[in-house]
Amino acid sequence: MPLATTLAYDEGSALPNNAPEWAVSASERIRQKRAMGIVSRICPPEGVKNVLLHSCCAPCSGAMVEEICSSPAIDKVVVFFYNPNIHPRKEYEIRKEENKSFCKKLGIEFIDVDYDVEEWYKRMKGMEFDPERGRRCTECFDMRMERTALYAHEHGFDAIATTNATSRWKDAKQVDDSGARAAAKYDNLEYWTHDWQSDEMTIRKYQISANERFYKQEYCGCSYSLRDSNEWRKANGIPKIEIGGETAGLGERYFSNPLVDAQEESQEVVDEFFAQANEIAEAGKDHKERKKRLEVYTSRRKNEADDGILNGLNNW
């Protein structure tokens, strides 16, 4: 399926001499692929020609859209935007409109589904203090994948997939399990699994994001993620998250440097974040205990702030 507008990235000068090996190797594989006209070598599930791609945001969509659309085996890709978890409405509209504009530029159909926020809160009841990647996230993925699968079934798609699977901030197995459960409800519908978090896909994602100057979101999206992120920032003397505008609470407002942006999603940064987040979440609703656990990281993070090193705190 050829793209109406070619996804291109002006890489300019070569990677710096101190670029990590994974970035050098991934960049070389991308260069070789582009020299061949960006023909994807990924294999969709057998018999799959038409794909409904659930998209959480434009930054997570770029490389995945490119890879699926450039597969000779695929005839049709439609982007499906159903994310009632995103809060507040202002942030929701920013992410949705950017995604919609990106699809329009590429000539890809974009399905805008209702902002079903009341139902989302009903399904999340009782899990307000669960950690990221916990039960609440499973329920959130389930809700979005169920709606995606239903639409795919009603409109004759062969498979569903989701851009949530591209982010190392997400547990790929958790995402894939939700997708597989949703697709299994219908005959002749597959959930497309693939290693969308590879080094090559990650750096390509950030090349496209920099070229498009996509909005850099500072938290996952839901009100609980926003609450916990701001609570953590406050305890460590870090500015709170800013919704919209030209200035981010921390770091750059828009993607601009693929290598730096990809490093913010390095496995080391992600693992460290979730190790801390899980410890804090164990305190549940006990505000005193949550504050006590947050203080464990205060000195170290403030020292990092003095050094100018704040990796991974504003790139979801």
Image (tube, rainbow, N blue to C red):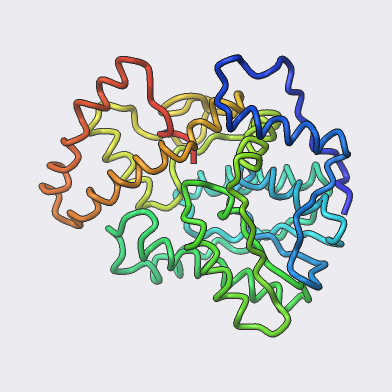
Residue 31: image location, x then y, percent:
77, 31
Which residue lies at the image location 37% right of the left edge and 16% below the top edge? 308
**Figure label count:** 0
Q: In this view, does 261 lie above or below 197?
A: above
* Drawn side of residue 174 relative to residue 12, left or right: left
Q: Is residue 1 above or below residue 297?
A: below
Which residue lies at the image location 39% right of the left edge and 35% below the top edge? 241
Residue 42: image location, x then y, percent:
75, 55
Which residue lies at the image location 30% right of the left edge and 15% below the top edge? 306
* Drawn side of residue 131 relative to residue 123, left or right: left
Q: The N terminus lies in which quarter of the figure?
A: bottom right
Residue 80: image location, x then y, percent:
68, 60
Camera-nearest residue between 121 and 268: 268
Residue 135: image location, x then y, percent:
36, 65
Camera-nearest residue between 58 and 35: 35
* Drawn side of residue 313 relative to residue 99, left or right: left
Q: In this view, does 102 lie above or below 75?
A: above
Q: Quadrant of residue 312?
A: top left
Which residue lies at the image location 70% right of the left edge and 48% below the top edge? 100
Q: In this view, does 91 lie above or below 22?
A: below
* Drawn side of residue 44 relative to residue 171, left or right: right
